[in-house]
Image (cartoon, rainbow, N blue to C red):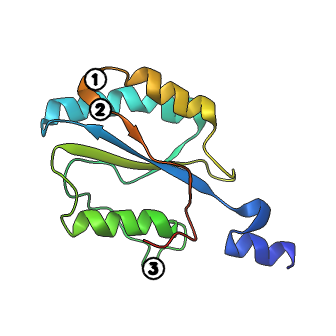
Amino acid sequence: MKKRIRKKLHVGEYKQCGNVIILNTKGEVEIAEIILDKLQPIIDEFSLTVVGGGTGRILIPSRKGNKYIPDFAGAVITAVVEETFPNDQMMFCIYVKHSTEVPQSALDALKQSFADEQYNLQIGKSLDLWHTDL
């Protein structure tokens, strides 16, 4: 397969993997704000791209009409819009543009930043963002 086609289809060296991050907010807006404040330096430091984010229903554009939002992120957003996501949790799908996966150092920084038990940090395994069937 030619390089241009591999890039367009996000396969081979152009495959992109990301992780779903879930944090406990106990349904409180104040904790959600604290989470966003703690998350921002990690996003900046590791050049993470965040798709989604919020408590309860996350209303951001789906992939429909936007070829730059990965399939998996679109599926996660659809699940949330369908109200299958608990209102006391906050979810993010993170990945690094032009990179095959989120660096372990970024995941370690997340673990360290949210080590407090109140957040109940969950980091999903690395998933192919463009070719995941849910």
Mark earlier in primary sequence (2, 3): 3
- Assess disc 1: are there few (<14), some (14-19) or many (≥20) residues with their C-alpha within 10 Å of its C-alpha: few
Q: Are marks 2 and 3 in contact (CB under 8 Å)?
A: no
Across and down, in percent, residue 61 comes to 36, 67
Q: Nearer the viewer, residue 127 or 71?
A: 127
Residue at x 75%, y 70% (from the top left corner) = 7
Q: Are marks 2 and 1 in contact (CB under 8 Å)?
A: yes
Which numbered dot is residue 120? 2
Residue holding disc 1: 117
Q: Residue 131: percent from the left, percent from the top?
A: 57, 71
- The residue wearing badge 3 is 65
Frontmost residue, 127 versus 74: 127
Please state which of the two labelled residues, at mark 2 or mark 3, is closer to the viewer. 2
How far is mark 2 from mark 1, CA to CA?
Answer: 5 Å
Where residue 74 sits: x, y (%)? 41, 68
Question: Looking at the image, which residue is at 45% across and 21% down?
Answer: 112
Residue type (three-letter) at the residue carrying disc 2? Asn
Type of the residue with mark 3: Gly
